[in-house]
């Protein structure tokens, strides 16, 4: 807590900051003053002062020329399936949100498991040699699947399992608590992937009916905002899954991603997964840089594979 002495706050306030999981000056910069005040139980004035001082202490560059950005380039890790990597412009992108939308059985959960393995692969095999966080809202995490996928990639399953933090959440409140308060110390352990499977299930279950829609969307938006803060702060990849809604109008049955406007704008890349007759199909349907294209894959005991 030595660096904190430069913030010019009392020992009591420092203790309060520590209690809400703030361990470094960088952590402070993820909060806005109102949030810090409310969470830590300090006055808004103090919170404002702390954050302003923190910004002075952490001399983070915010302005880059476009050429510098180009030279830095983008960072990806492999999905373990060549067709999907090509579709996604090189794999799963860090500092971006990738959303996989699909009906039941389209492979969303399988892919989430696989990514928790491939992010750990050595760099020469397309990985980032990093850890993964799997936020399980549907009770579908399976260490057995991780074991068989690890075997395929010839990486020790014990090593892989050790480097996946599984957070199980049963309610929206618990999900928010987990993401906002329990994740920060874990993310410092070299995590480059946060998976949320699924982002919408708990919200759909708890906020029922039109009357609760506005509140639901607001809460969902806030949660995703925190995922984005982590994404920027730790340069990691966020991947979440989303369900499909069926709405009938006359003879037409429309299939739409759930989550309305909020999810429509939240992700960087949105990918639709479908089950075909004897294989599966992924289609990029909304992305600022990827063309609208399709790729096919299959699901086996070994995970998601090229056809
Ligand atoms: P929901 O969560 O219900 O919306 O579906 P999902 O999109 O997450 O589906 P999931 O990823 O669980 O994919 C399920 C499909 O993967 C199943 O229908 C199986 O066909 C296939 N699958 C899962 N495990 C195995 C396996 O070990 N071997 C084979 N061959 N297929 C598997
Ligand atoms: Mg699933």
Image (tube, helix red, strand yellow):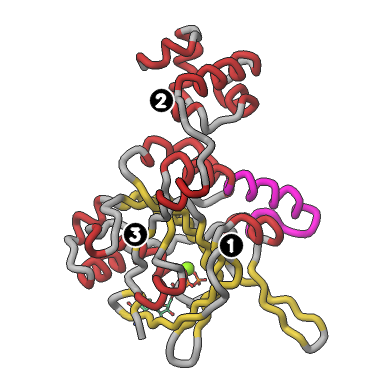
Q: Secondary structure at mark 3?
A: helix
Most foreground residue, 163 or 90: 90
Q: Secondary structure at mark 2?
A: loop
**Image point (39%, 78%), residue name:** 83
Residue bearing mark 3:
116
Q: Quadrant of residue 49?
A: top right
**Where does the image place residue 160, in percent across and percent down from the top left?**
24, 57
Asked if the residues shown at circle 1 and circle 3 are in contact, with their CB atoms under 8 angstroms apart, the answer is no
Mark 2 within 8 Å of ligand 2, using the beta carbon: no
Earlier residue among tags 2 and 1: 2
**Image point (42%, 15%), residue name:** 4
Residue bearing mark 2:
24
Determine if residue 128 is in view: yes
User: Which of the two discs, 1 and 3, sits closer to the camera?
Assistant: 1
User: Which contiguous range is marked in magenta?
Assistant: 205-224
Identify the disc placed on residue 195: none
**Where does the image place residue 102, in percent across and percent down from the top left?**
55, 73
Residue 165 among magenta residues: no
**Where does the image place residue 223, in percent across and percent down from the top left?**
58, 46
**Where does the image place residue 179, in percent across and percent down from the top left?**
49, 43
- Position of 257 with respect to 181 (left or right) is right
Q: CA distance from mark 2 to mark 1?
A: 34 Å
Q: CA distance from mark 1 to mark 3?
A: 25 Å
Magenta segment, prevailing SS (helix, strand or loop)? helix
Q: Secondary structure at mark 1?
A: loop
Residue bearing mark 1:
288
Residue 210 among magenta residues: yes
Determine if residue 174 is in view: no
- Position of 81 with respect to 275 (left or right) is left
In which quadrant is the C terminus drawn? bottom left
Most foreground residue, 17 or 307: 307
């Amino acid at each position: 807590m030595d660096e904190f002495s430069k913030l010019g706050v009392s020992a009591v306030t420092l203790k309060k900051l520590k209690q809400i999981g703030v361990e470094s000056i960088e952590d402070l910069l993820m909060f806005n003053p109102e949030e810090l005040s409310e969470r830590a139980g300090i006055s808004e004035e103090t919170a404002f002062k702390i954050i302003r001082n923190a910004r002075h202490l952490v001399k983070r560059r915010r302005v880059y020329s476009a050429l510098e950005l180009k030279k830095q380039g983008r960072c990806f890790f492999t999905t373990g399936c060549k067709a999907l990597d090509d579709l996604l412009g090189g794999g799963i992108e860090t500092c971006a949100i990738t959303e996989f939308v699909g009906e039941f059985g389209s492979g969303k959960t399988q892919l989430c498991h696989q990514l928790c393995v491939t992010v750990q692969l050595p760099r020469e095999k397309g990985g980032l040699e990093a850890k993964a966080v799997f936020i399980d809202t549907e009770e579908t995490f399976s260490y057995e699947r991780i074991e068989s996928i690890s075997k395929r990639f010839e990486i020790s399953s014990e090593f892989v399992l050790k480097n996946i933090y599984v957070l199980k959440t049963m309610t929206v409140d618990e999900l928010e608590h987990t993401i906002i308060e329990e994740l920060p110390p874990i993310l410092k352990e070299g995590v480059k992937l946060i998976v949320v499977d699924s982002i919408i299930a708990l919200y759909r279950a708890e906020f029922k009916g039109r009357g609760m829609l506005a509140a639901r969307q607001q809460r969902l938006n806030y949660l995703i905002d925190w995922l984005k803060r982590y994404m920027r702060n730790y340069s990691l990849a966020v991947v979440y899954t989303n369900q499909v809604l069926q709405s009938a109008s006359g003879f037409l049955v429309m299939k739409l991603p759930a989550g309305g406007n909020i999810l429509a704008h939240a992700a960087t890349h949105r990918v639709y997964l479908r089950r075909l007759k004897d294989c599966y199909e992924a289609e990029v349907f909304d992305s600022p840089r990827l063309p609208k294209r399709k790729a096919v894959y299959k699901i086996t005991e070994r995970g998601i594979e090229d056809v």
